[in-house]
């Protein structure tokens, strides 16, 4: 039997610590997933980008699983550790940043080719 073709691509950026658990939950729920190592532009910390091509009606399920597995918290980061803000040699207050949550984009898939 022919599998349904994905018409939406979910691109999910998550912290390294949540990535494997999120992959496990997606796969358990029959949702395909690929994990790619990535790095955040602001903090320059390792994170992971997970892509999942699904039928439109499964996007809400993906979003629900992401909400369950990836919880954001606030962290104060010394400005000196930021690669481009910390070069000035001045002392400044730590910067409050969001860590541990997820960013999810949903894109239309123009074509899906499987060989
Ligand atoms: P980073 O770029 O390393 O950003 C980490 C966190 O630092 C961000 O969390 C945000 O709270 C904060 N941040 C980013 N830029 C900032 C700035 N100019 N000033 C002050 N604080 C700033 P999230 O928003 O949850 O983003 C987590 C990661 O998701 C980002 O890591 C980046 O890898 C990715 N990301 C977020 N928005 C994106 C977008 N629109 N396009 C592509 N990647 C995105």
Image (tube, rainbow, N blue to C red):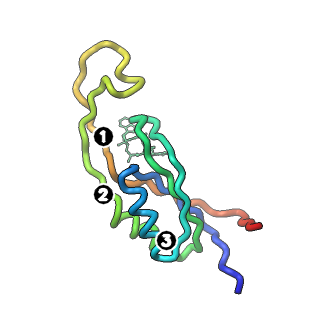
**Disc 2, SS:** loop
**Residue at the image point whose x is 41% and y is 63% from the top:** 22
Instruction: Report the mark closest to the observer, 1 or 3.
Output: 3
Disc nearer the start of the sequence (2/3):
3
The one nearer the camera, 109 or 113, is 113
**Residue at the image point whose x is 31% and y is 23% from the top:** 80
| Residue wearing tag 1 | 97
**72 relative to 3, above or below:** above
Ligand 1 under 8 Å from disc 1 Cβ: yes
**Disc 3, SS:** helix
Q: Residues within 10 Å of mark 1 (few under 14, many from 20)?
A: few
**Residue 57 image position (x, y, % from top left):** 53, 76
Q: Between marks 2 and 1, how big is the CA–CA gap?
A: 14 Å
Instruction: Report the mark closest to the observer, 2 or 3.
Output: 3
Q: Residues within 10 Å of mark 2 (few under 14, many from 20)?
A: some
Ligand 1 under 8 Å from disc 2 Cβ: no
The one nearer the camera, 20 or 40, is 20
**Disc 1, SS:** strand
111 left or right of 30 in image: right
In the figure, residue 3 lies in which quadrant? bottom right
| Mark identifier at residue 71 | 2
| Residue wearing tag 3 | 27
**Residue at the image point whose x is 40% and y is 54% from the top:** 102
**Residue at the image point whose x is 31% and y is 13% from the top:** 89
Q: Quadrant of ligand 1?
A: top left
């Amino acid at each position: 039997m022919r599998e349904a073709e994905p018409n939406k691509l979910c691109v999910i950026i998550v912290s390294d610590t949540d990535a494997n658990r999120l992959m496990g939950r997606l796969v358990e729920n029959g949702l395909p997933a690929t994990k790619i190592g990535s790095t955040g532009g602001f903090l320059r910390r390792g994170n992971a980008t997970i892509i999942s091509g699904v039928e439109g009606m499964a996007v809400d399920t993906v979003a629900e699983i992401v909400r369950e597995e990836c919880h954001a918290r606030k962290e104060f980061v010394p400005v000196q550790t930021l690669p481009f803000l910390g070069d000035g040699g001045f002392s400044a207050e730590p910067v409050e940043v969001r860590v541990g949550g997820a960013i999810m984009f949903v894109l239309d898939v123009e074509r899906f080719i499987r060989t």
